[in-house]
Amino acid sequence: MKMFMLVEVILSKKSVNPESGKVVYQSFFNNAKKVMGEDGKEGFLPDTGKVKFDHPLSKGWHLLMVKISTYQGQVFYTGLKEIKDSKIIQALSEGE
């Protein structure tokens, strides 16, 4: 399932898969504010979590399109796209 989520990134950490050599960045977040599915339905996120992305995310608010998957009862977020419109991000983070 794909969803949009607005999160406050607190740390990005580089990770390398030893078998494939692929580099992935894990960005840890707090205060997930909004989550909306492709169908327009809102969802809920934990207060803290992490999302895998192909580049590091700076500290601060980010609006991301993510793919959500589950494995053995755990939820995983994989970043697909970052929305970089600062006006939208500011409005959403302020709850307007």
Image: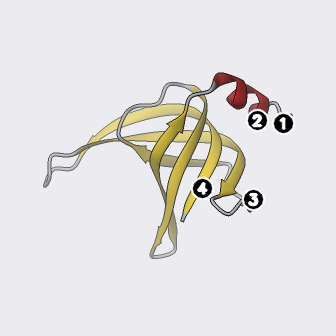
Between the residue at mark 2 and the residue at mark 3, the CA separation in whole angstroms equals 14 Å
Rendered position, 90 above or below 79: above
Q: Image point 15% across, 50% down: which residue?
A: 18
Q: What is the x, y in percent for residue 78?
A: 44, 52
SS for dot 4: strand
In this picture the colour scheme is secondary structure
For label 3, the SS is loop
Query: What element does badge 1 sit on?
Result: loop
> Residue at the location (47% across, 30% down)?
57
Side of 12 relative to 38 (left or right):
left
Q: Kindly identify which residue carries mark 4.
A: 3
The CA span between labels 2 and 4 is 15 Å
Q: Amino acid at mark 1?
A: Gly
Identify the residue under disc 3.
42
In the image as oriented, which residue stretches furthest toward the bottom? Answer: 72
- Of labels 1 and 4, earlier in sequence is 4
The one nearer the camera, 1 or 77, is: 1
Q: Amino acid at mark 2?
A: Leu
